[in-house]
Image: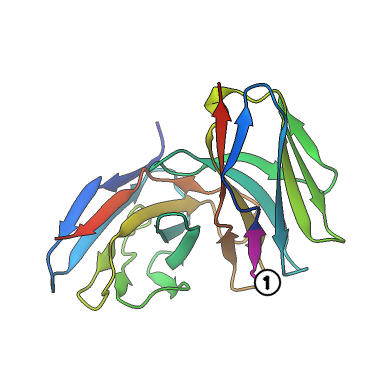
Amino acid sequence: DGGITQSPKYLFRKEGQNVTLSCEQNLNHDAMYWYRQDPGQGLRLIYYSQIVNDFQKGDIAEGYSVSREKKESFPLTVTSAQKNPTAFYLCASSITVRTNEKLFFGSGTQLSVL
Amino acid sequence: RKEVEQDPGPFNVPEGATVAFNCTYSNSASQSFFWYRQDCRKEPKLLMSVYSSGNEDGRFTAQLNRASQYISLLIRDSKLSDSATYLCVVNMLFRDDKIIFGKGTRLHILP
C-alpha cells in the first residue's frame, strides 16, 4: 500500500544536539511538507518542497533544515538553534502544490527535550 | 484578523445530536477549502473537500459562503466515534502556494 512513513515515532533530544526526523513516501508525489503542532494549536508550516532539489521556508523555519535529494525522501533536521523543539511533527505530501489535491500525512513524530 | 479562524472548543454534545462548526478565512482569493479530522496524537485525515455548491457525505454536510468568507461543517446524528478535533484548511494558492490550517475545534460526543 502507498503512503508516508515517518520515523521514529518518539524522539528525545539532548541540549545542543541536532536530530533528524525521517519522512519517506511511495505515492510518487512531487510536493512534500513539514508541519509542527503544539498542544491546542493548529499545524504550522516549517518547510515545503515542490520538487527534488528545491525547498522553501514556511512560517517557522528558524532552527530547522531540510533536504530533498530524492523524490521519495524529505528529512527534517532540528538543530540546536531551535530553542523550543518539543512538539508533534507531521510530514505530508500532495501530488503537486498548485492543485486541489488533498494532503496525505505520516503518523507523526513526537520530539521531546531531555 | 487571523488567516483561518475556527470556533473555539471544546464542544460537548450528546450522542444523536446535530453539531455545527464554523470557520472564517481572511483572504478572499482563497481557492480550496477542506475539513480534516484529527484524533488525539494522530495524523489529520481528510474528511471532506468543500465546494461552492455545498456537498454532503452521509451524516456530514459542508458548505462554503464566499461572500461572507466562511465554511461550515454539519454533523447529524452524532456518534461516539465522531469525537475528535476538526481542522479547517484553506489553500491560498496566491500566497506562496501555502495551505493554512485552523487551530481546530475539539468535539466530545457524550453517551
Q: Position of residue B104 (x, y in %)?
A: 56, 51
The residue labelled by disc 1 is B94
Lateral position of residue B4 relative to residue A113, left or right: right
Amino acid carrying label 1: it is Phe
Q: Is residue B81 depicted above or below B42 in this figure?
A: above
Q: Residue at x 75, y 51 (%)?
A: B71
Q: Residue at x 56, y 26 (%)?
A: B110
Q: Residues in magenta?
A: B1-5
* Front residue of this view, candidates B49 and B106: B106
Q: Residue at x 22, y 57 (%)?
A: A112
Q: Describe the colour scheme in one phrase.
A: rainbow
Q: Could you say whether the residue bearing mark 1 is in a helix, strand or loop? A: loop
* Front residue of this view, candidates B73 and B29: B73
Magenta span: chief secondary structure: loop
Q: Position of residue B63 (x, y in %)?
A: 79, 44
In reply to whether residue A71 is colored magenta, the answer given is no
Q: Is residue A8 visible?
A: no
Q: Residue at x 83, y 58 (%)?
A: B66
In reply to whether residue B3 is colored magenta, the answer given is yes
* Front residue of this view, candidates A46 and A95: A46
- Quarter of the image with the C terminus of chain B is top right
* Front residue of this view, candidates B64 and A38: A38
- Quarter of the image with the N terminus of chain B is bottom right
Q: Position of residue A107 (x, y in %)?
A: 36, 43
Q: Is residue B48 visible?
A: yes
Graded by Cα atoms within 10 Å as few (under 14), some (14 to 19) or many (20 or more), the crowding at tag 1 reads few
Callout 1: chain: B
